[in-house]
């Protein structure tokens, strides 16, 4: 073989090796692209799955509610010496509440309160009026229906204090309903400020136990959030559905106080912090002063810290 032929053979061989190397590199790049694309698809599917699970868990069917809150609230009445809770079955899982039957011509003041345990205006009304309300209920001249719910979860720095506190109240209603009113008052006496984390679950357990709710099932019910899905469903109903025994299309602020279906706190004269004004409203609505109404001279007349028109509105936008 001549030198020219030998050189040509070497060049051809080199070109072939280069071609083979280029083909191998192209194949490697194709494999990498397929692998990367597959990985992206797998990660995307995983993300979609996680998001789907979150959405499903968040919007899934509500579990059963607490016993003794068939109306989404707890009804308290008296026999002349004590105040007890009316026993009712629970709202079934994914079911609807049963409104309390009210006879607004029976001469009894049927008082209904929609409240949030972080709401400062609820605390003002509670502090000013609960002593005389308890007297009325104990005497049998009034009933009291309490509907705690979540309006202000967004005001507790992510801890969802309103929901946790309402869940705790539901636990008390379920296991020791006659302690509910004392626990309700304890929540206001120990009310955290808006814009704080609120009480921890352990502190809530301590609070309800000190208030007299000592049933051994209550602590685990609180810390496990047993009735949190019911709280979410109940809150949705309160903020979107017509309010039973009234002409209100929904609750728009806390406290929403009703007496025989009529709302208190809608005028400047109806101060949340004036028990005499509330007693006068009850008397005008029912047609007679309830037994146990203190005389005006004996009534507390604490000065309101805000106008009644401001007190009748929530201090935060309802959580969705």
Image (cartoon, rainbow, N blue to C red):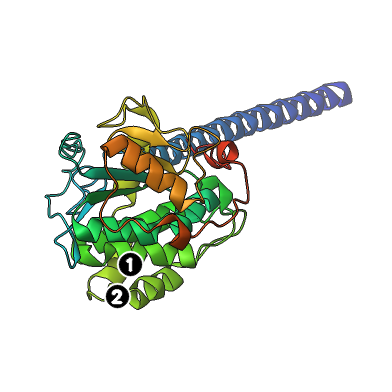
Residue 247 location (% of width, % of height): 32, 24
Q: Which mark is residue 120?
A: none
Residue under label 2: 212
Q: Secondary structure beneath disc 1?
A: helix
Asked if residue 20 lies left or right of residue 11, the reply is: left
Vertical order, 68 against 70 (above or below): below
Instruction: Answer yes or no: is residue 197 visible.
Output: yes
User: CB under 8 Å between callouts 2 and 1?
Assistant: yes
Residue 309, x across and y down, in percent: 57, 36
Q: Which residue is mark 1?
A: 182
Counting the numbered discs, the total is 2
On screen, residue 320 versus residue 247, left or right, reads right
Q: Quadrant of residue 210?
A: bottom left
Left or right: 16, with 198 as reference point: right
Residue positioned 18% across, 43% down in the render: 93
Q: Residue at x 27, y 50 (%)?
A: 290
Disc 2 from disc 1: Cα separation = 7 Å
Q: Quadrant of the N terminus?
A: top right
Give residue 81's position: percent from left, percent from top. 18, 68
Looking at the image, tell me whether mark 2 or mark 1 is earlier in sequence order: 1
Q: Residue furthest right?
A: 3
Q: Nearer the viewer, residue 166 or 28?
A: 166
């Amino acid at each position: 073989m001549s030198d020219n032929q030998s050189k040509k053979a070497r060049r051809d061989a080199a070109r072939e090796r280069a071609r083979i190397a280029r083909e191998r590199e192209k194949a490697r790049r194709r494999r990498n692209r397929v692998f990367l694309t597959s990985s992206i698809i797998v990660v995307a599917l995983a993300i979609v799955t996680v998001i789907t699970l979150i959405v499903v868990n968040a919007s899934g069917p509500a579990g059963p509610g607490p016993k003794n809150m068939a109306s989404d609230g707890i009804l308290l009445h008296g026999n002349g010496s004590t105040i007890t809770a009316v026993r009712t079955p629970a709202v079934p899982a994914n079911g609807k509440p049963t409104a309390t039957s009210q006879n607004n011509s029976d001469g009894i003041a049927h008082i209904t309160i929609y409240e949030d345990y972080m709401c400062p205006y609820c605390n003002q009304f509670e502090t000013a009026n609960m002593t005389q309300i308890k007297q009325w209920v104990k005497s049998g001249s009034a009933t009291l229906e309490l509907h705690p719910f979540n309006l202000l979860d967004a005001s507790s720095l992510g801890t969802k204090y309103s929901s946790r506190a309402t869940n705790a109240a539901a636990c008390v209603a379920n296991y020791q309903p006659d302690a509910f009113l004392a626990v309700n008052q304890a929540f206001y006496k120990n009310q955290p400020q808006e814009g704080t984390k609120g009480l921890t679950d352990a502190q809530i357990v301590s609070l309800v136990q000190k208030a007299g709710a000592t049933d051994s099932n209550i602590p685990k019910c609180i810390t496990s959030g047993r009735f949190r899905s019911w709280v979410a469903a109940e809150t949705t109903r309160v903020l979107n559905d017509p309010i039973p025994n009234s002409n209100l299309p929904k609750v728009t602020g806390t406290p929403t106080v009703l007496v025989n279906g009529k709302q208190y706190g809608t005028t400047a004269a109806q101060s949340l912090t004036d028990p005499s004004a509330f007693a006068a409203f009850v008397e005008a609505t029912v047609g007679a002063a309830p037994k146990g109404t203190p005389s005006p001279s004996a009534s507390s007349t604490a000065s309101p810290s805000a106008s009644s028109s401001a007190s009748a509105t929530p201090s935060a936008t309802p959580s969705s």
